Amino acid sequence: MHTSILLCYLTLVALVKSWQPWPAHWLDDRASPLDGQIPLFTEQCQISNLTAFEMAKGRRMVDFTTNAMESFEAPKVTPLNSTAGEQWEFDGVSEDGMQSFVFGFYRDANYAILGTGNFRLSIEFAFANRTRFYEVYYPSRCVVEHCSVGTRGKWVDDAEGYSFSFQVNADMSEAVVFLDSPTVKGSVTIKSRSRPLTADGHVWPAQNASTEGVPFYHWSEPIPAGDVDVDVVIKDKPLVFRGMGGHERFWSAFSWFTCLTHLSAVRAMLGPYVLTSFSFTSNINPGEMRQSVLLFKDGLPVFRSTLTEPSEVDDYALVTKTYGGAITGTLKDKVTGYQLELVFPGQDVRDRDSGVRLPRRPILGSVVTAGDSETNIRARKAPKEKEPTEKAALGRIHRVQRGRISEVNFQISTYNPSIAPPRWSSLDLSKSPRQTEAGSMSLLPPQSTNSQTAHSTFRAGKWKAYIMPMIMAGFLLQLLFLGNMSYLFGALFKSTTRMHNLKILAIDFDGGDIGKAISSAYSNLKSDEFPSLEFGSSLEYRTPESVRVAVCDRGYWGAIYTHSGASERLLTAIEGDNTAAYNPSDAVTYIFNGAHYPAVASSLKGSLQTLLSVASKLYPLASPDAVKAVNMTNPMSAGALLNPFEGTAWDIMPTNQGTRVLLNTVSMVMPILMQFFFQMAMNGIMGNAKVLETQSKRDIYVFRLGSGKIYTFISALVTTGYFWAFREGWSVTFGQFFETWMCIWLYMDINYLLLDTVMGTVIPMQFLSFFVLTWVIVNIASTVYPFDLTPGFYHWSWALPAHDIWLLLVEIWSGCRSSLDKTLPILFAWWLVVHFSSAWSVRRRCLMAEVEAQRARPTGDKFTQYTTAQSQQSVLERMSTRASGQAAKERSSDNYDLEAYRLGESLPNGDASRTTTNAPLSTG
């Protein structure tokens, strides 16, 4: 029996493989060009040939097809406009459920505003090792050819070198997708095992059918489910498998997000059965949900329903999400399965389209649970006896929701309510069939008895307690980042137009034509975007060293000077009288400090080189004698005129290591963050240990102060250490290492004490992040660029510790730009103030902790203070009252713990909390 079935199946497969529903040239994806594709015989085909940015402009009306009798594959929106779009979707999953794919061919102008055009194509594969291959393409051209034998679509981009196409035959029983790109090549074939469907559950073609899923959103299913053959190569790795898949068509007047709030899809094949279920929730009509569930047997429909509630007359389907399975998707809704109940209320029901009588006892199968690599399908008929009929199917299906692949478990139960309600079998989704044990269980997790759902009346009154604060928090965060980043960007805004604030000293020790050429070049380059040249006197600056000192200590960003006798040596070389080789570099020198704002120093160096380059070109104009004396037949003479001089760089402190750009940027932020995280940890630890409310304030202050000194000392050492570890060829000494360490220690100590002052005392913890971010931004803005290039408003940042620490570091590393008369007073003012404020903050923090501890103490512990004598009298009176009416009993003179007789009440907290008396008690 099994052998004959297998032979019949193989014969059927062979016939399907040999039958080709489309012309031969369609089978070769590269056979036909795009422009004017090869015509199909002599018939008239509908061809839509569009480029990526071609669409109707303005408020022009376009054709939008809603006729469910037409082929689902033909273009539905012609031409495209700015709101409407359509999609051809193909998906599938392997037989073992471990591999899957989703392809989306889009003609959709909703995202054209991003500059990608109207076409989009997504290719996604999920592999057995839980990795994904996902690529999105934006083709330059799309051609859809719809003819009597079928439909073919091509999404191509010749410039990028890829071509993707699909073809579906006329009765939509077979689809082939061709993939051809640098990363993925191959084909995917889907052969249907059911019939095309419309959104309202009718089998195509049907006169009364509708493709509208929800308002303005249309859907159809040309292949609800079928056999899939995948043969592709992804990044030189072959992928071949067989399984189950399908094909959907979507088209809408507006984007998905406008029309929908939810889309859920389920497809399954169980033995001779094919199941498909779709549900849509409208965004335009809130709360409107439409559902379509169909069941095929041997390719013919045996169940169809769009009802979501039980009915006594019409067929209905109840679809319930289940959770708690082993596999979830990447969507917000972590559903892991679906429970579907297909119900036939009538006794003799026939399919509305085919007239096939619906079976009263459905035939269903069982498929292994997710996570088991084997497939075990057992199809069997329900018993003929009139007993409660129930059959369940548990298995792995392929779920697609808004273009994302996920796998879910499902359980299906069909029954006739006129016979008996179903009894659910015991099925553990986390176990394989061999592990399933008998017993009863609920497919849905039980609702908590001590909580309310989000839609309950109880929760409705609670929304303002957390929704409005969340909205306000989001709004305040937007303002915070907008303000801070505007401040930071504003510090650099139009900084190039303030380059003239960088002063360059120019000294002409030569007094000849070279100096004139430099002056003439500056006259041509002078602008707001070029450093300003100030020509000094050689009487004031008599030596090159004096010029270097001016750059180092007098506020100049750089200097340029000519060498004495340079013009005379140059003219001699031009005249050809100099037998020695002329050196053009021995004419002009420019000076700058590479350690002073390294990024700006690099820009300044480029400006000085530009100045000398222009001056070299203008030298013949500035020296008529040189032009007259040149001998163009003499190479040395001509070369001296054409390249009269070059600049020699004198970098006071070469700072060329790659990390130099981090010195005045990220390195000024890290010390703040280090103190912030340490303070958070210390406060949490001390709070949990109840140190603040139990120890003396003085001890706590000394401990926190000492801990801060030690931590910042070590942190500064670590920071200086990675400065030196990545210094490359930076010429810094051990003495400079120690000075840098002490400087950063001072900076960290200031930030530690500042955060100790404000954290939890001045600024509540919920707003501390606002302060820390703002503090970081204003400090980094004070060091990222010099004040010469920032607007005047930012000059208040002289008062910030980061700016003054940076100037100290520059002086330590280069010996220049000394400003100790400004930086040290500011820094030590910060240091003294935060020491006093930190002491105040510790005291306030301890008081706050004591108040919190008092509030948390049980009410019974709060009582009036009594003396020992008062405690004895109170206890005796209470005991006498409780013993009234009873016979008098004599007691021995043993000791009695009076507190133990208080019948569960607390003893007044006197000087002695427990009182013992050595007197006989009587109740008279």
Image: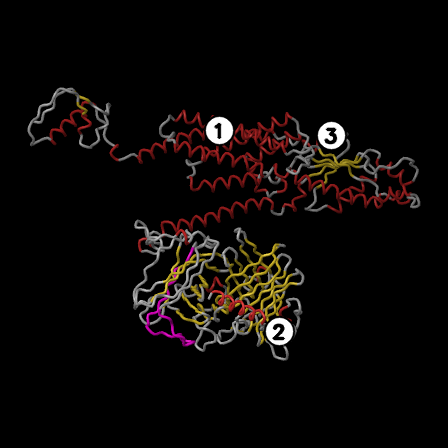
Residue 713 percent coordinates (x, y): 53, 27
Query: Which residue in the protein does label 1 denote?
Result: 708
Q: Is residue 143 above or below residue 860?
A: below
Label whose residue precedes the other's in the sequence (2 or 1): 2
Disc 1 crowd rating (10 Å Cα; few below 14, some 14-19, many 20+) is many
Q: Marks 2/1: CA distance?
A: 82 Å
Label whose residue precedes the other's in the sequence (1 or 3): 3
- Most frequent secondary structure within the magenta stretch: loop
Where is the C terminus found, in terms of image quarters?
A: top left
Secondary element at tag 2: loop
> Mark 2–mark 3 contact, CB under 8 Å?
no
Q: Nearer the viewer, mark 1 or mark 3?
A: 1
Query: Which residue in the protein does label 3 denote?
Result: 546
Secondary element at tag 1: helix
**Observer-nearest residue: 217 or 538?**
217
Q: Marks 1/3: CA distance?
A: 45 Å
Its colouring scheme is: secondary structure
Rendering quarter of residue 413: bottom left
Q: Is residue 654 above or below residue 867?
A: below
**Observer-nearest residue: 628 or 440?**
440
Query: Which residue in the protein does label 2 denote?
Result: 23
Type of amino acid under label 3: Ser
